[in-house]
Amino acid sequence: MKSILSLTLIVALFGGWLSSAANVHAQADASLTAKVDRKELSTDDTLLLTLTLQTPDGSSPNLKLPAIRGFRVAGSSMSSQLSSLNGAMSSSTTYEYRLQPTSAGTFRIPVLTLDWNGQSLSTDGIDITVTQGAGVAPQAMPPVSSNAKAADSKVSRVGDHDFFMETSIDKETPYQGEAVKHVTRMFSSMTLPGQPDYQAPLFVGFWHANEPDVQQYQSTADDGTTYDVTDITTWLFPTTAGKATIDPVQVTVPGGFFSEDEKLQSDPLTIDVPPLPAGAPADFNGAVGQFQLSATPDRTTTRLGEPVTLRVTLSGNGNWGTLGDLRWPSDKQWRVFNNKTDSQSKVVNGEMTGSRVYEQLFTPLSEGKLTLPAITYSYFDPTTKQYQTLSTDALTIDVTAGNPNVAVSLPKDKTAAPAKDQTAAPALTLKPAPQTLLSEAPPLTQQPLFGLLFILPVGLVAVELTVSARKHYLNTNASSLRRSRALKRAQRQLKRARRSSADRGRDVQIETGRILLAYLEDQIQTPLTGLSHGTLAQLLQHRHVSPALIDRVIAALFVGEVSEYSQAKLQTNDDVVKSTGRLLEDLEKELVA
């Protein structure tokens, strides 16, 4: 009875292997189809578009639907079904897209093309008729709600209902050095496969910060469409008077599997920059904007020679990147030292604001009530079109007598009486060095081991570089090293299996199958345990292994499986080891070539 069961198992396994091997070389074709649930609808309805992708390798890619004129994607879903027949896998993936009409008219679901493993798959185009429903007809490029409106000045607008872009500036005639807000606003009502690529203009003729300010939010248009909005704000400052042109903004909208990227380009924007008027104050250094100035000392009473720290703060709206520094007045009553300067800027309520804090050290040169002079700063105000001069208050500092040792180092008045002669200090006598400090030993540089001190660091560096290079080579070439050593490793394992064939019996045939499978894993760099014979044959076929050699591999694995699951032996242990060794050598020739 056991013999009958063993023979039945052998025939079943052998028949399954023949069926799998026969299906390996029959490559099924992939297909892509499209259908809709209706071809006529109103603007109040939605259209269900279903794509079905069938592949023979079990793959289910994540497809992205391109923008379709006349529709926007209101929702999507994906489901897949995997099946295996005689070791050959196949997959059917269904993609469903719920499309909302954006206007009435006749539209076409375009031909969708997909490149799958070198095979071009495509669907048929589908014509759709959309009639006007009871609701308000959507607009091609709808106005959005008030929180997303562009600036009131020049605006460039390109795109369609699903994705469009506005580029604007808030001033058409800014003064030289006056801030101009350049805004690029992108609206998207659909899910994109990636982020749009924003390419800023060069802004020739303008000073601007390197990094723009980016904000993202959602806005609802008048027709009810919800948009994801991205604002990119760049602050520009004209550097010369006359006509100035801001180059177009370019945005690349990423496509999906079925469509190419779409490029949008705004119109160029032109402004007229008038020069600053004549009559600038003497201390004017080019500042344009609105500013405030304040000064605060850290003390109002000090001693002679001890400094007073004066903290001066300049704040307001303007170009803090090119703003000129304060001009400090000179006064013979004080010695002035520059301590530190701290500058910062940020956008507040849509305006470029900032501050610059100066800290100066004023050291009094005499006693009494001394005055810190007023500090002035002039700028041009573009709102009033006039020059303005700011001034701090003069500050009185009470200076008392200080440390004599500090006061003596301060500069003296040239009219002061000469100092009295001081008694000369007695001369110091030099003494000879004691004999114990004299050494007759040779210097260190003349000792034999001194030269090794130079060679030792070089040797340590060379060893470190060699070890690091070896580690780097092993890390970066782990896969290739594993493949190059696969045959030798398998041959050593076969020798051990042959030596133990006398006492291990049928286990040797099981071991040879495992050795062969481990060799293939090293060469293909893919786990193979648990795969069917058909899937393994497909992998070998992709590696350009000949069909005859693939049949030998499947047969060798089949022998090991028969020995593992039954008492039958198709070959002797010695024959199995020898045939497996020859099979490994033949595989090495084709896999390594």
Image (cartoon, rainbow, N blue to C red):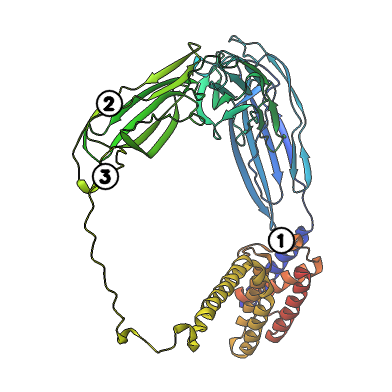
As rendered, which of 236 and 500 lies closer to the eye?
Answer: 236
Farthest residue toward the left?
401
Amino acid under disc 3: Pro
Label ID, residue 395: 2
Name the residue that disc number 3 marks. 418
Sequence order check, earlier mark of 1 and 2: 2
Sequence order check, earlier mark of 2 and 3: 2
Name the residue that disc number 1 marks. 539
Residue at the image position 31 percent from the left and 81 percent from the top:
433
Q: x and y percent of residue 496 in the render?
A: 62, 86
Amino acid under disc 2: Leu
As rendered, which of 221 and 589 lies closer to the eye?
Answer: 221
Q: Residues within 10 Å of mark 2 (few under 14, many from 20)?
A: some
Helix, strand or loop under label 2: strand
Helix, strand or loop under label 3: loop
Amino acid under disc 1: Leu
As rendered, which of 330 and 63 lies closer to the eye?
Answer: 330
Q: x and y percent of residue 334 in the render?
A: 31, 35
- The answer to which image quadrant residue 14 occupies is bottom right
